[in-house]
Amino acid sequence: GSIVNAFNRNSMFGSVELDSLNPHRVDYVNIKVVTSLDEPQIESCRQGSIADLIQVLRSRGFRWTCTDSDPTLMMLQCVKDLTRPYCRRHANILLQQQNLTST
């Protein structure tokens, strides 16, 4: 979600792989839009090229979901540096939740 044109119709995925997907064999397409912790959100499920991808999926009869900033995928970015503000904030929330469930 931090780059312009995250979905590119002219890319290998957009021009070959997507066109080869069979909606009768693929039950669901799950789109996860992940924003870099250090960059602004440019793309989302409702704007930019991801909306174009969703339109292609709809027109071909696919069932789909789209999630912006999935917390699990966002936290994976923290593996390199737990001192980032997002990482510290969410690590504290997770620790508080764990303390509440263990008491």
Image: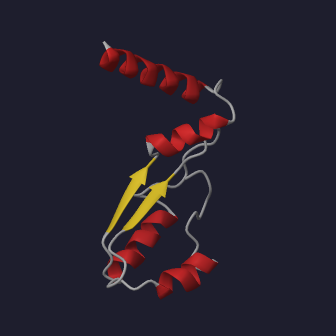
Give how far across and how far down residue 46 sits, in percent.
Answer: 40, 58
Look at 40% across and 70% down and name the residue there: 54
How many numbered marks have been drawn onto this rendered protein structure? 0
Toward the viewer: 6 or 101?
101
- Specify the quadrant of the image occupied by residue 30: bottom left
Look at 50% across and 80% down and name the residue there: 18
Look at 41% across and 78% down and name the residue there: 56
Q: Is residue 10 above or below residue 90?
A: below
Q: Is residue 4 above or below residue 88?
A: below
- Specify the quadrant of the image occupied by residue 83: top right
Give how far across and how far down residue 102 sits, in percent.
Answer: 33, 17
Quick one: which residue is furthest to the top in this view? Answer: 103
Toward the viewer: 35 or 83?
83
Quick one: which residue is furthest to the front in this view? Answer: 102
Give how far across and how far down residue 101 sits, in percent.
Answer: 31, 20
Q: Would residue 6 be found to the left or right of residue 72 on screen?
A: right
Quick one: which residue is furthest to the right in this view? Answer: 80
Give how far across and how far down residue 11 sits, in percent.
Answer: 63, 77
Colour theme = secondary structure
Q: Quadrant of the C terminus?
A: top left
Q: Is residue 39 above or below residue 13?
A: above
